[in-house]
Amino acid sequence: MLRAVNASRTTRWITTAAAALALAGCGGGSSPPAGSGPVMATETMAVRRESPHFQVLAGQAPAAVVDAIADRLEAERGRLLSDLRVADVSQVRVRIWQDQAAWNAEVVRYFGRSFTTGGYIAGPGEMRLLAVDRVAVNATHEFAHIVSLHVNPGFANNPRWLWEATALYENGELVDPRTLGYMTSGRPPTLQTLNSDISANTQVYEVGYTLAEFVVATYGRDALLGLIRANGDIAAVLGLTPAEFERDWYAFVRARHLS
Ligand SMILES: [Zn+2]
């Protein structure tokens, strides 16, 4: 991942995001919002909710959607900070798109290419969301990413498997491994595969929860935090090779979820 180390904080984050091309380009809910209106090139936004923790901006999104997002963020904020042992996070701006075409245009503008996503973060101070059915869950997923950046400011997609695993686990997004053919048939993905670009492989969204679950259940929460701080250096934190980690993770999933 490229870094503009001498740039300002804001510029650095945007540069990092553009370089990664998928900074928290999180899947989850790609169906267009129900009742979306005519195609718009842009969606004009205004502040719809504000607290010391979150400033929520939206355009066409109905009040019920804005409230569901703001309420879930407020409800989960304290736990996420506590879980990741972060003392505080300054106010986060939340931008909500209702119009699919306007959202797609913004993704292309920001990342320089098109890909399917329901939300992403633009640095540690802002998340952007499409008002899909599960948008409130996506919001806390993105907030988990933001909190994890306070554990390690250089953590975004570095490595991608642990970046997503942490957010999925903290947000309770377990995908039952019994529904994943490659897991039931003994063909779990490697960490290298899970680190693939979002356009090449999205299995990390399916198994990410269990990766962090395995770390916490086996080595404790301090080990997960240690891995975040060490950008996923398994050998340094856990004393395992990546192959040993993959083997032990799959044995854990088989015992906990597949037996
Ligand atoms: Zn994510």
Image (cartoon, rainbow, N blue to C red):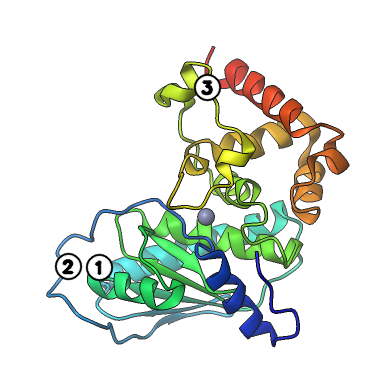
The numbered disc on residue 4 is none
Secondary element at image label 3: loop
Mark 3 vs mark 1: in front: 3
Q: Which mark is first along the chain, 1 or 2?
A: 2
Closer to the camera in the image, 186 or 127: 186
Q: Residues within 10 Å of mark 1 (few under 14, many from 20)?
A: many
Mark 2 vs mark 1: in front: 1
Residue drawn 67% across the image and 56% down it: 158
Q: Which mark is first along the chain, 1 or 3?
A: 1
Distance between the alpha carbons at the discs numbered 2 and 1: 8 Å
Residue 56 picture location, percent across and down: 44, 78
Residue drawn 54% across the image and 11% down it: 259
Q: Which mark is first along the chain, 3 or 2?
A: 2
**Is the C-beta separation of discs 2 and 1 under 8 Å?**
yes
**Is the C-beta separation of discs 2 and 3 under 8 Å?**
no
Amino acid type at mark 3: Arg
Closer to the camera in the image, 199 or 219: 199
Residue 143 picture location, percent across and down: 56, 63
Distance between the alpha carbons at the discs numbered 2 and 3: 40 Å
Q: According to the image, label 2 marks what residue?
A: 36
Q: Is 54 rendered above or below residue 11? A: above
Q: According to the image, label 1 marks what residue?
A: 100
Residue drawn 48% across the image and 26% down it: 177
Closer to the camera in the image, 81 or 106: 106
Q: According to the image, label 3 marks what residue?
A: 187
Amino acid type at mark 2: Ser
Q: Is residue 239 left or right of residue 75?
A: right
